[in-house]
Amino acid sequence: MASALQLVGIRKSFDGALALDGASFESQAGEVHALLGENGAGKSSLMNVAAGLYAPDAGSISIAGAPIALSGPAAARQHGIGMVHQHFKLVKPFTVAENVLLANPQPHFASGIRNIRAAIEKQVGELKFSVDPDRRIDTMTVAEQQQVEIVKVLVGGVKILILDEPTAVLTDAEAVGLLEIVQRLARSGTAVVLVTHKLQDVKRFADAVTIMRGGKTVATLDPRRSSAEELTELTVGRTLPLPERTPHQGGPTKLNVGALCYTRGDGRTMLNNTSFHVRAGEIYGIAGVSGNGQAELAEALIGAIEPTSGEIWLDGRGDISRANQAKRREAAIASIPADRYAYALAGSLPISDNLAVAQIRGGRYGGVIKLDRAAMRRDASAAVRDYDVQGVRSINQKASLLSGGNAQKLVIAREFSREPEVVVAHSPSRGLDVRACAAVHQRLIAAREQGAAIVLISEDLDEVLSLSDRIGVMSRGAIVGEFECPADRQAIGRAMVDHG
Amino acid sequence: MIPAAPSAFRGFGRLTLDVRQDLPAWKQAAFVGLSLVFGLAISVAILAAAGIPPLTLGNELAGVLTAESLRGVLVQAAPLILVGLGASLAFRIGFWNLGIEGQMIFGGIFAAAISIYDVGPQATRLLLMGSAAALGGALWVLLVLFLKNRFRVNEIIATLLLNYVAMYFLFHLLYGAWQDAKTAFPQSSPFRPFERLRDIGYGINSGLLIAIAGVLAAGWLIHLSRIGFYTRFISANPRMAKIVGVPVQTATIWIIAASGACSGLAGFVNVASQEGRLTQSFSNGYVFSGVLIAFLSRNDPIVIAVVGFLIAVLFIAGQTLQVFYQIPFTMVQMIEAIIVMAVASSEFMIRHRIRWLR
């Protein structure tokens, strides 16, 4: 029997940047097929091609063995391909039935909405969802909205269902519930494509897995017959070399985070009494399944958000959780955030400006009246050279033109331009190649040798294990276990998932 | 290879839209220039439909450059340049200051108050009036910044609506306490000679000096000063700016105050040079012109001086057309609007690339 969906040699570039480089993918009816890869590996781009959102530059798409051309999402829908996006496409003031109607147009509104309501109830009954067709979207939780999205595609008679990172927005229990339903859907004959970067979901729910890296599909295998290490290695490429270092000298406590709480705008509690301390000359690793408050912890530490309660105490500075940025800068906190372009760089501005900005206030580049551009250029050229930032044609070029790894080097060059007392690094090697990754790790270790307190938050357990002196495991917004290094990988893994 | 487009569109291909990463400056300028030409072409067509043949139009525009008209142009250019600076400073940090008229009104009121209550010696009177005007404009816009920070009031709506509050407050004064007792018109008593901006020779009004000083000050603020450096980060990535230690709040207050001060000075220039007293309508239409000038000059103070001058030419030519061809003043405003839209749409072309895929 021919594959339900087959993509061969898909290429797609965005204004010169190659996102898909001859990627191929094949999924069968009746199976959950995971598409695994790091952020930026091209998973979403490939599936957007399948869903008719992107026109590929080259390559072919066939459904049940027959080659097709997709002029847009509507055409994909006609071929039975439906996609649930990571960011929902729902009209918030409309009811469930109206949203489903919008996606599945009917000739007449009154009779159409009746038909739609009947179809929704049928689907909801089969899937055991709790969706009321007459509720407004803006009164529903994220998990319920996701159910609406799924019902919306299924009502259209979809045979190939693509879910883009469906569990990213869900709690663990919700995620398991959803994936079980997805598995049932597959058993009843739908071809399900599960785009994800979560290894656990793949191991537990997928029948097949295709791994993407750098816009290419590198392997398709059976997740039940392959080890997590094997999958990880295929996802990230070569495993990271372990950096060398001296044993830890227990210094005095430098940073103490006490009972930190943070409730997000939508009412979800992201930090729930997070407490830990970091000594001078120590790397404190924070491990955990992504979405358990790590991002918020990092944001609170670097001052992007103000915690609801609790304190961030810094030796000699006091509580800085609500301090203004001037005071934070004075405290020499180096921040290396996960999302470089959101938190650390202004992509549209020159490299030299991005390097200088943190030290303008301190007066390094002239007074209030006139900035010393020459000094900025001089320092920028030196930093680019010292930190081996590649791809710099001119220090006046926009920072956004640098690749991920080089942008990260730029951030590190700036943050380490003064000797930092505290370093907050959140997934500092995300999206970096092996060489760049090793360079980042060396910098962290060098800062440790100089006596800085380093908080390393990472979803990559290997990174945490290889660098940390102590490891705290974060789950549901709290540190639920602490391990001295060298720590037992299995024990940490259990703490990450068992809690609660 | 991918099969051709679906049968219904076969042969046509399809239109795709890409986001551009980067575009050289000269190409950006070319897009703006083309849009400008396009906008002007539409304007000429509309004027032709209103009964002014393009050739006559050309003659009228050339006529503006005679010595006598040029004097009028330069008088008109001063407030235009100042409101252009006022709009562009705020736009640079993404604060949509559409309250230029309100700020002009308060600039005018503060300046007039100095005259009416006879504050300070004669020698420094003009200086005092100018400072008061700048202060008045700044306070009126800082009120909006306060509302925005404290209550999250959208500044577009707040600045726009406060124009009406300012206008009715002005009416309240002109129909009440400050009404000219001699004429009983709704306007203040005329300023004394030492309270007026006079010509400095060659038929150039000293208001233009204020505008040029404003251009130089704004050029320094944006291109050389520390705050100017901060503004680029505040507009490019405010969240990142805060994290890396840019004093976002302080820089915002200074820039917004400077924006209001420029508008306030424009009000001062208008009451102290053209009108010589506080009138009902000295600020009419300047929001529009300010936005237009800021847009056309891409918020660069030096370019604003040039664009402000060109818009003044348009204004004076418009006045001539009004007198000799009976077209309404709204026609001039419409041309301004068309040009704003044309330039605004060039932004889309600068950010995107449209391609035919076959």
Image (tube, coloured by chain):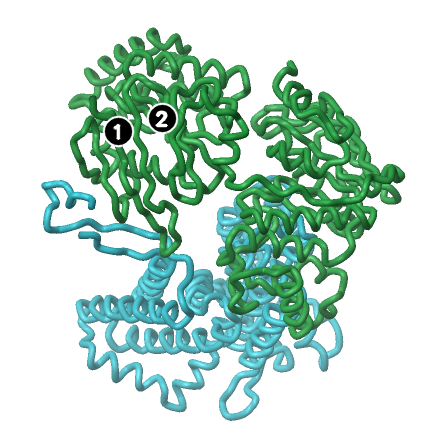
Residue occupied by mark 2: A193
Locate residue B289, reporting x and y percent: 43, 65
Q: How many marks?
A: 2
Quarter holding the C terminus of chain A is: top right
- The image's mark for residue A5 is 1
Type of amino acid under label 1: Leu
Q: Is residue B212 above or below residue A186?
A: below
Q: Position of residue B329 (x, y in %)?
A: 33, 67
The quarter of the picture where residue A258 lies is top right
Give the cyan chain's letter: B
Q: Quadrant of residue A155?
A: top left
Taking the spot 86% from the left edge, 41% from the top edge, the residue there is A315
Give the chain letter at badge 1: A
Q: The residue marked by circle 2 belongs to what chain?
A: A
Task: Look at the numbered disc 1 and give the secondary structure of its residue.
Answer: strand
- Residue B326 image position (x, y, % from top left): 25, 71
